[in-house]
Amino acid sequence: MGLEQEQQFIKEVRQNIVETLPLGQILDEELEERIEQIVQQRLIQKGQYCSIEQRISIVRQIFSSIRGFGLLDSILTDDTITEVMINGHENIFIEQNGKLRKLDKKFENQRRLEDVIQRIVALAGREVNQANPICDTRLPDGSRVNVVLPPLALCGPTVTIRKFSKTPMTIEKLISYGSISQEIADKLELLVRAKYNIFICGGTGSGKTTFLNALSNYIPRDERVITIEDSAELQITNIDNLVSLETRNANASGVGQVTIRDLIKSSLRMRPERIVVGEVRGAEALDMLQAMNTGHDGSLSTGHANSTHDMLSRLETMVLQGAAGLPLEAIRQQIASAVDVIIHLSRLRDKSRKTMEITEVVGFENGQILLNPIYRFEEDEKSTLEKVSGSLRRTKNPMKNIFKLQLAGIRTEI
């Protein structure tokens, strides 16, 4: 049975099931059995042959179109797929093993895709409609979802899903992927334990949240940690006293919005020892910096930037969004005293994700923030246009800000 025949067959069987079965009174297991029986009968009636694999796929597609996310279910269960991009009901793209490609599948129509979107959004208690056409949410497994509806999305309902591994990211996995070495992982563990404020920056898809997740597992188990995110996706498993906070969009009436800024302010009254902000992208940068400067050492966060210098410029711009009257010099002093270490990640030409730089913020002088690069990524002779080969190399610069290491009783040199 060809693809078009299969889709037509699924459409007919699904319509028959919706019209004839009391779906509200049937449990999932019973429904799946009934679908299997009906599919078998229909195939015999039509005299059509299909393999066992195709028949199982047809049953799954019909079941998921009624009770699940339809076509998305089979995509989401494939662990090799890391990102899903739906540009209208006919165009579905996936990232698989670092490569982008278009799927030869599509939703029956725009209405079916809209139904799936409403199911996804409702699971996290959010809403998306013409009055509120943009929504950030998550799936039950923690995968991040962004939805944009027409008329904003001209090609039809647009959905972007960033999938996350079912097992939490660890430093050991980053070492096995070649992102960092064991030596650097040991040094990062010392920095986290000594409560250095660490900022992770990089471009889209460079692995910032993944790295933050791995780094957060170095936080001592007995500390009280508060995580703040747009849509909860961090998987911190080793902390007992953990509070996870998530923002909320405004409802259809335009009220009830809770921003990252609101959550940071609230978290300061919750006796946190560390605050982990999933991503800083606006006026909340000022509150984040103030938290770092008022006794909440060991805070971790991420931000979009193409280099460590760019991250500092972006932080300045973000602070100005929240406090337009502040002089630039005061902002730079605030950043220099709040942020201790910046880790820059990048997605390279061969689609691999690497740690490009680990830099220490050493202070403020003559109107500028001073940086002290400790590790830099250097390509070696094995690098080609298609494949990047290299490693993080220690610079000749000694680490200057060792006060927190000394306070923590750590004598090891970084």
Image (cartoon, rainbow, N blue to C red):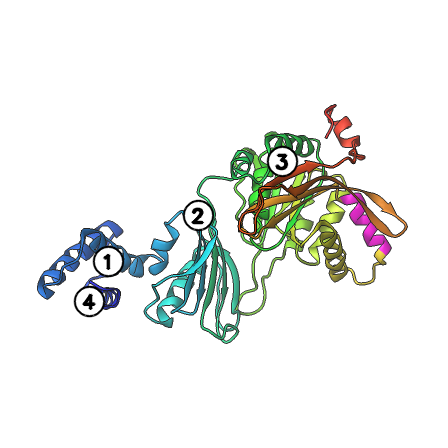
Pointer 3 and pointer 4: residues touching (CB < 8 Å)?
no
The C terminus lies in which quarter of the figure?
Answer: top right
Say whether disc 3 or disc 4 marks the residue closer to the N-terminus: 4
**Residue 276 position in % (x across, y down):** 63, 44
Q: Name the residue under label 3.
A: 224
- Which of the two marks, 3 or 2, is nearer to us in this view? 2
State whether residue 270 appears in this view: no
Residue at x-position 13% and y-position 62%? 48
State whether residue 152 appears in this view: yes
Q: Is the magenta stretch mostly helix, strand or loop?
A: helix
Q: Name the residue under label 2.
A: 141
Pointer 2 and pointer 4: residues touching (CB < 8 Å)?
no
* Residue 256 covered by magenta stretch: no
Magenta extent: 329-338
Mark 1 to mark 2 CA distance (whole Å): 24 Å
Q: Which amino acid does label 1 sit on?
A: Ile
Q: Residues within 10 Å of mark 1 (few under 14, many from 20)?
A: many
